[in-house]
Image (cartoon, grey):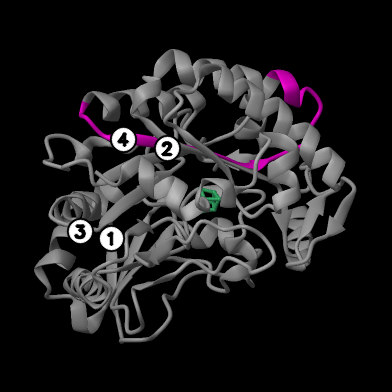
Amino acid sequence: MVITEPRSWKDPSIYVKKIHVEESILDLDYTQEILDRANLPYTVIADRSDPQGIAGEYPDNLVQGKHHLLLCKNRGHFFKPCPGTKEYRCCDYQVLNIGMGCPMDCVYCILQAYLNKPWLTFFVNTEDLLQEMEKAFLADPDLFFRIGTGEFTDSMALDRFTRLSSRLVEFMAKQRQAVLELKTKSAVIDNLKNLDHNGRTVVAWSLNSPEIMQKEEIRTATLDERLNGAAQCAKWGYKLAFHFDPIIDHPGWEDGYAKTIKKLFKTVPAENIVWISLGALRYLPPLKTIGTNRFSGSRIFYQEFIEGLDNKKRYFRPRRVTLYKHIYNLLKKYAEQSTCIYFCMESDEIWQEVMGYVPEEKGGIPAMLDRTVNI
Ligand code: SF4
């Protein structure tokens, strides 16, 4: 039987076909709510055991594994600093670990190399999650926290089932020293409607050239779907952010990125955009093996790369500068003065060459970002 995939992946949770529930959390109200909303077959499994029925070896079984969602308890920490590296300028982000894996499938996704289980995982003990954040805020009352949930998963991909976004937005609305960024490649925004967000949640989309989005970002929302979602969030009063990451060198890249940027500013009010990040493709060497095996038609790993100070492969510096200058200049043409355009994990030399200054001149990247949202 040939299974035809739908034309729109606005909501990638439709890829999930089966749920596995850890025994000890089955009776939680939240687990039951998720099961009701998902309306999918589920099996109950022993705590800390693996879902069954996913044939093959990791990572070859990822296509199949992404049909499966495990609901379980997080027995570790929910909240920790983003593992930036000391060699490059990073933005001091805090990661809120809501789950692992993603129903979408980007050729360059670092999770393919970072994780070793093919299924998706969502942690249902959200009361613990909120308590841990409260504790962290109390322990550091003078610190301003920029928090993201999209480190090991996509922030919104499973939100139709979980509605976690609403809980987080309402929790964050009451915080005076923190802002939450929900970052996605989907267009699942319904649960953000009618919330009293108090400007404490930034809704963010990763963007790329239309060709890269179509060829290398499988089961993601289209550019129009992402931007229309962003425009709707702006109408609901949310601040927005965009991430051009990874920027990929490909034939026609100048026009491709120009098209995306023009459409972005045509669709979305510039004054709602608090930050835009730029980051050229970088990866740890094992990702190339996985990516080229899983996506044999992709050419993105067949370029010239050097190994950076963080052991990640990157384009040569002059090439990165060429890519960045083109995109930065286009963004500067349309963006508001107040929008912080920054590099994710680049050196001072690149900042100077492309933007004409180094972050320290403006207090450092964390301070530059904090100023845009710290109301
Ligand atoms: S959307 Fe993000 S988390 Fe999901 S596959 Fe793509 S890069 Fe990975």
Determine which residue is flagged by label 3: 34
The image shows residue 158 at horizontal and vertical percentages of: 33, 51
CA gap, disc 4 and disc 2 = 7 Å
Residue 121 visible within the image: no
The crowding category of the residue bearing disc 2, from other C-alpha atoms within 10 Å (few below 14, some 14 to 19, many at least 20), is many
Quick one: label 4 or label 1, which is nearer the N terminus?
1
Determine which residue is flagged by label 2: 241
* 3 relative position to 38: left or right: right
Quadrant showing the N terminus = top right
142 or 189: nearer the eye? 142
Q: Nearer the viewer, mark 4 or mark 1?
A: 4
The image shows residue 63 at horizontal and vertical percentages of: 57, 56
Determine which residue is flagged by label 1: 41
The residue segment tinted magenta is 236-255
Q: Amino acid at mark 1?
A: Pro
In the rendered image, the vertical position of residue 37 relative to residue 235, given as above or below: below
Mark 1: which secondary structure?
loop
